[in-house]
Image (tube, rainbow, N blue to C red):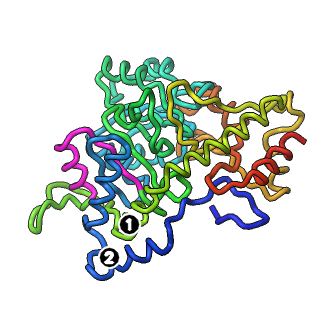
């Protein structure tokens, strides 16, 4: 998204490192002449993120899609993968690129996440994996999903692109499943401009993932498998180290924005939003509202356009559903009848501006347009 100016309120704005500190780190990179391939800042960032996120192992990538592709490769997933249609297309694209077949299951309307109660009916002898998404940073029902996976012998990869730092009952949700993936795109709470990571639970798998993201190379003369180039460079790692120092402050500011929105919109007929989940440390990645046209007196798209007319650029996120795109719409599981909750949410959602740089004036300008 574009950076904010005095006349434009965008749905997000990147967390930027201190410029003077960043210059100093760039000088270090320049002087040592090591700009990629597991340099000092890359390794420092992996260590720092393991500590911050309370996870045992992490592997950095150059964007948020490559961890999804690599997780499916590392776990040798084949056949069918159960997933949600209510996500960014990278979730399902990663399945397709691994020559697997996505199977869509409907969502829970209270969270926007894959509904565990609908999963078992979608399992076939070809099913090998479940790929849920912690939508908007709301934790999935991991207990329900993991119970089904254990019962049916399935792997679980959580797409946690929105869930940086999210905890439930004091435990990182990134510890759930076989692996979790993160995105460090500029629109995310924590970013490296572009980047991503794979959360891994054991040392052996960490080595396998690190080999896969480096062409399968293990030493100067050995290639152990058909890997790809997914490595994060030193410049982005340095960028991330500086942003990690200020991410808690950014999350606290986002929390205050969420409180303003929640309090001000409570009494607006036809407008609803999620509440904080009990026991969850949220990161306030997004602030979605849902428009009931009959009660509100205006459709979602009419409100979306009205906000744009006042230079408030929200986002209909996620609309259209992945299952509606031509690549996937022919799948039996993509039928509208199979996904009523997902369609209802996709057709009513607007994500309001939500980031650490919003002023109270900008917040209440947005609220006033909605209430008017």
Q: Residues within 10 Å of mark 2 (few under 14, many from 20)?
A: some
Q: Viewed as shown, does residue 81 lie left or right of 138?
A: left
Q: Give residue 246's position: percent from left, percent from top.
A: 49, 56
Residue sticking out furthest to the bottom: 31
Residue 201 among magenta residues: yes
Image position of 14 with respect to 204: above or below:
below
> Which quarter of the image is occupied by the N terminus?
bottom right
Q: Viewed as shown, does residue 87 lie left or right of 352?
A: left
User: What is the spatial separation of the Cα atoms under label 2 and label 1, in whole angstroms?
Assistant: 9 Å
Tell me the quarter of the picture where residue 54 sits: top left
Front-most of 52 and 100? Answer: 52
Residue tagged 1: 238
Q: Viewed as shown, does residue 160 lie left or right of 292?
A: left
Front-most of 370 and 94? Answer: 370
Give the SS element for disc 1.
Answer: helix
Q: Residue at x 33, y 39 (%)?
A: 179
Q: Is residue 330 visible?
A: no
Q: Residue at x 34, y 69 (%)?
A: 234
Q: Give residue 160's position: percent from left, percent from top.
A: 45, 41
Q: Viewed as shown, does residue 252 lie left or right of 67?
A: right
Q: Residue at x 61, y 40 (%)?
A: 321
Tell me the quarter of the picture where residue 55 sits: top left
Query: Which disc is residue 29 wearing?
Result: 2
Tag 2 and tag 1, C-beta contact below 8 Å: yes
> Which quarter of the image is occupied by the C terminus?
top right
Q: Residues within 10 Å of mark 1 (few under 14, many from 20)?
A: many
Give the SS element for disc 2.
Answer: helix
Q: Residue at x 86, y 28 (%)?
A: 295
Q: Is residue 217 visible?
A: yes
Where are the magenta residues, as a range?
196-213
């Amino acid at each position: 998204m574009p950076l904010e100016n005095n006349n434009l309120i965008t749905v997000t704005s990147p967390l930027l490192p201190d410029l003077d500190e960043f210059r100093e780190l760039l000088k270090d990179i320049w002087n040592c002449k090591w700009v990629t391939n597991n340099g000092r800042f890359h390794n420092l960032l992996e260590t720092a993120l393991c500590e911050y996120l309370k996870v045992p192992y992490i592997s950095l990538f150059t964007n948020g899609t490559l961890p999804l592709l690599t997780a499916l490769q590392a776990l040798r997933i084949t056949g069918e993968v159960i997933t949600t249609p209510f996500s960014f297309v990278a979730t399902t694209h990663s399945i397709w690129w691994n020559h697997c077949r996505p199977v869509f299951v409907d969502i829970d309307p209270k969270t926007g996440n894959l509904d565990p109660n609908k999963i078992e009916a979608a399992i076939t002898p070809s099913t090998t994996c479940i790929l849920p998404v912690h939508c908007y940073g709301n934790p999935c029902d991991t207990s329900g999903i993991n119970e089904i996976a254990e019962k049916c012998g399935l792997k679980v990869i959580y797409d946690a692109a929105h869930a940086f730092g999210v905890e439930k009952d004091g435990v990182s949700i990134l510890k759930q499943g076989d692996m979790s993936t993160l995105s460090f795109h500029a629109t995310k709470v924590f970013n490296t401009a572009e980047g991503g990571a794979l959360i891994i639970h054991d040392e052996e798998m960490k080595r396998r993932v690190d080999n896969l993201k480096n062409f399968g190379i293990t030493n100067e003369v050995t290639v152990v498998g058909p890997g790809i180039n997914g490595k994060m460079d030193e410049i982005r790692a340095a960028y991330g180290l500086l942003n990690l120092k200020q991410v808690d402050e950014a999350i606290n500011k986002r929390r205050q924005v969420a409180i303003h929105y929640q309090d001000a919109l409570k009494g607006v007929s036809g407008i609803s939003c999620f509440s904080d989940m009990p026991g969850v440390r949220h990161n306030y990645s997004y602030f979605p509202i849902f428009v009931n046209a009959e009660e509100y007196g205006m459709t979602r798209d009419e409100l979306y356009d009205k906000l744009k007319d006042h230079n408030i650029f929200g986002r209909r996120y996620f609309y259209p559903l992945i299952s509606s795109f031509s690549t996937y719409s022919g799948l039996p599981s993509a039928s509208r009848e199979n996904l009523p909750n997902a369609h209802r949410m996709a057709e009513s959602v607007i994500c309001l501006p939500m980031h650490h740089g919003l002023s109270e004036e900008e917040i209440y300008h947005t609220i006033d347009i909605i209430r008017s």
